[in-house]
């Protein structure tokens, strides 16, 4: 009766050799792109991580896996990772929550919401670099709209850098959650109203659970974006003040420029595995609680 | 348990009038059916009782209390939606328990203040509802794992558990297959008899209305056409709309003129229709009237005064339907048994004057 039971292993149709060959042929372009631009470079990366190089870029010495162990446990790597994690902590909950609130307001067609819809959807229209430049001018202590010294204050710098990402995450969350809300049957929310659920309770107990697949998707994607943050610290603070906003990818970028590819490769691989573990953990812990409509 | 009263209630959506000056009193404990075609305003009226739609004009009372501005959850009514509107991510048990979690109830008696129910009280009520609706054993399942009929019963249990003043039902049977529908009709009537709560039931299906209602309120384009028992609306339809909406096949209506030549009758071309015996309205010679008779009241008779050109005959086993026309107006005749009538011929029909209905051609109102 249920879809799961129908798709039990032994009931799935067997494909003929010809069908399998055609399927493979159709997949070749995708596979080729992935191999060329991800898998092969990744293997290269793993390989380069085993080389130590000097300032002028020539590969010097094969030092093997020792470099991985040394660099991944170094304070520099851990500091970069921590800054990236900080960035995620600032940008993901805020962007997600604000996006949800806006989407709920837009869904209920509150007065004046069309203007906000346009404003917030447009945050995605510009690139990360452009948005960062805009915020750079907004937050400039001398000529900015908000003349604050956040960008030059080591305690506030990371937050200030995160602002432009919060802005963009809000736009993405808004658009995707709004789309997801269309699939929440209105009568179910009305039934909750009759059951005495107030607006907050309806949102938390009814609406959000029913869009949980969308929320999981956003969470995973925004965390991945956050761990890879580069443009914002690069443009807004250049990693300062005193290295307070040097995210991991920022460090990798700086390492690679003076051609310290070996260590840069190690950091990249490290970041990959951290992202992998975090994403897997999100799925393992949260997917149980996601409600998929049949 | 309470009455529901509409006093001159109007609902406007921008410039569309969905419900137009509705005056309707549903008695305490009554099973009232709001019947009408799509878009007639019956669902809007129901949702106004629930509080899901605001009221533009007029007063709505539940019991003696004017509820126009009272929150849906405070009106002490429950609703069964057409799509059941079960919470898909909750078990059947949680679905049924849902109205008891937040709302306050007069659990200590109608004079004592309303309070939240304790866990034991909630569990007790959920078990009772599940038992009454035959849902034992399904409590731990989620709605996706239930059949349509089971989901409907969960929706009913959820409505039942709060012991509301009135049950509101929005076409609850329309998503069920025909056989289940017939069975559930009986169960609903039975449930109502046991629980004795006021029910306001919306449907477009006249069979449901005729078989379940104490009284039927027929609506069209936002206006109330007639309120009465099934028998009243069938035997004495207040206007042409009601006459043609109730009954399958619908009442035959023809344009004719009144005459007193050879006795009072309505003349339609060559055919003569007798006039109802207790007609009080004075009709003038040659006055245009609309005459109506139900298919089952026309009888094939050799000395009948109505000439019917037969176009087709449908034999259904226990009866047959004869399709044809009287003076180019389509007329259907229902005949018991398998009468051997041939298509293409002309037959003569007779009708008992008691079963003739007259309507004014301009106002479409019944001429009594």
Image (cartoon, rainbow, N blue to C red):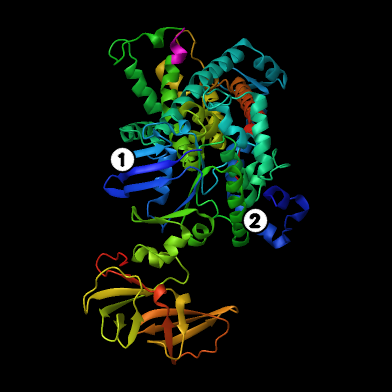
Is the residue marked by circle 1 packed among few (<14), some (14-19), or many (20+) residues within 10 Å?
some
Vertical placement of residue A19 versus B158, above or below:
below
Inspect the magenta stretch and tell me whether residue B62 lies in it.
no
Residue B318 location (% of width, % of height): 59, 78
Subunit of mark 2? A
Check disc 1 and report the residue beneath it. B58
Residue drawn at (41%, 30%), measured in percent from left and top? Answer: A102
Which portion, as a residue range, is magenta?
A155-159
Is the residue marked by circle 2 packed among few (<14), some (14-19), or many (20+) residues within 10 Å?
few
Residue B15 location (% of width, % of height): 26, 47
Residue B253 location (% of width, % of height): 36, 74
Quarter occupied by residue B136: top right
Does residue B2 appear in this view?
Answer: yes
Check disc 2 and report the residue beneath it. A23
From the image, state whether disc 2 or disc 1 is nearer to you. 1
Quarter occupied by residue A18: bottom right
Residue B258 location (% of width, % of height): 26, 78
B300 relative to B136 in the view: left or right = left
Vertical placement of residue A20 versus B55, above or below:
below
Residue drawn at (55%, 30%), measured in percent from left and top? Answer: A205
Does residue A56 appear in this view?
Answer: no
Q: Which mark is residue A186?
A: none
């Amino acid at each position: 009766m249920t879809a799961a039971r129908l798709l039990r292993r032994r009931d799935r149709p067997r494909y003929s050799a010809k069908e399998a060959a055609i399927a493979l042929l159709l997949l070749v372009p995708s596979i080729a792109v992935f191999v060329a631009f991800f898998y092969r470079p990744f293997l290269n990366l793993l390989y380069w991580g085993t080389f130590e190089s000097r300032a002028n870029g020539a590969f010097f010495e094969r030092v093997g896996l020792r470099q991985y162990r040394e660099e991944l446990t170094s304070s520099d790597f851990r500091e970069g990772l921590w800054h990236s994690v900080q960035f995620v902590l600032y940008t993901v909950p805020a962007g997600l929550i604000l996006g949800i609130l806006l989407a709920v307001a837009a869904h209920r067609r509150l007065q004046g919401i069309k203007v906000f819809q346009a404003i917030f959807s447009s945050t995605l229209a510009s690139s990360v670099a452009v948005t960062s430049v805009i915020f750079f001018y907004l937050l400039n202590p001398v000529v900015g709209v908000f003349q604050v010294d956040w960008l030059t204050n080591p305690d506030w710098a990371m937050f200030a850098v995160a602002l432009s990402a919060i802005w963009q995450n809000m736009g993405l969350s808004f658009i995707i959650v709004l789309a997801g809300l269309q699939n929440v049957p209105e009568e179910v929310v009305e039934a909750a109203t009759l059951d005495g659920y107030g607006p907050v309770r309806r949102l938390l107990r009814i609406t959000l659970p029913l869009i949980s697949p969308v929320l999981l998707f956003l969470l995973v994607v925004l965390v991945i974006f956050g761990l890879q943050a580069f443009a914002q610290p690069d443009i807004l603070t250049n990693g300062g003040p005193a290295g307070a906003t040097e995210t991991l990818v920022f460090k990798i970028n700086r390492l690679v420029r003076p051609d310290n590819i070996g260590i840069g490769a190690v950091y990249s691989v490290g970041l990959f595995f951290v992202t992998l573990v975090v994403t897997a953990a999100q799925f393992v812990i949260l997917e149980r609680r996601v409600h998929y409509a049949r | 348990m309470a009455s529901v009263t509409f006093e001159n209630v109007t609902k406007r959506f921008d410039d569309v009038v969905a419900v137009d000056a509705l005056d309707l009193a549903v008695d305490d404990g009554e099973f009232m059916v709001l019947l009408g075609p799509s878009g007639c305003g019956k669902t809007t009226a129901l949702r106004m009782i629930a509080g899901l739609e605001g009221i533009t004009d007029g007063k709505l009372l539940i019991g003696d209390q004017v509820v126009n501005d009272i929150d849906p959850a405070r009106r002490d009514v429950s609703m069964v939606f057409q799509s059941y509107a079960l919470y898909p991510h909750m078990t059947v048990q949680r679905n049924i328990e849902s109205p008891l979690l937040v709302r306050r109830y007069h659990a200590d008696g109608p004079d004592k203040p309303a309070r939240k129910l304790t866990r034991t009280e909630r569990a007790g009520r959920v078990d009772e509802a599940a038992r009454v609706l035959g849902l034992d054993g399904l409590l731990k399942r989620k709605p996706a794992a239930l059949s349509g009929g089971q989901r409907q019963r969960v929706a009913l249990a959820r409505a039942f558990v709060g012991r509301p003043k009135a049950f509101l039902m929005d076409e609850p049977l329309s998503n069920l297959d025909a056989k289940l529908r017939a069975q559930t009709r009986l169960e609903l009537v039975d449930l109502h008899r046991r629980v004795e709560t006021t029910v306001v039931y919306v449907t477009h299906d006249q069979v449901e209305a005729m078989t379940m209602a104490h009284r039927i309120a027929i609506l069209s384009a936002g206006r109330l056409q007639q309120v009465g028992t099934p028998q009243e609306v069938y035997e004495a339809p207040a206007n042409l709309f009601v006459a043609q909406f109730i009954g399958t096949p619908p009442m035959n209506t023809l344009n004719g003129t009144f005459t007193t030549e050879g006795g009072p009758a309505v003349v339609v071309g060559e055919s003569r229709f007798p006039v109802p015996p207790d007609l009080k309205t004075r009709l003038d010679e040659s006055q245009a009237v609309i005459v109506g008779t139900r298919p089952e009241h026309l009888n094939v008779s050799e000395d009948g005064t109505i000439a019917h050109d037969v176009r087709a005959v449908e034999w259904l086993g226990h009866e047959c339907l004869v399709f044809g026309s009287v003076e180019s107006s389509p007329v259907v005749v229902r005949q018991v048994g398998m009468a051997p009538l041939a298509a293409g011929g002309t037959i003569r029909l007779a009708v008992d004057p008691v079963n003739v209905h007259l309507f004014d051609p301009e106002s479409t109102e019944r001429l009594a």
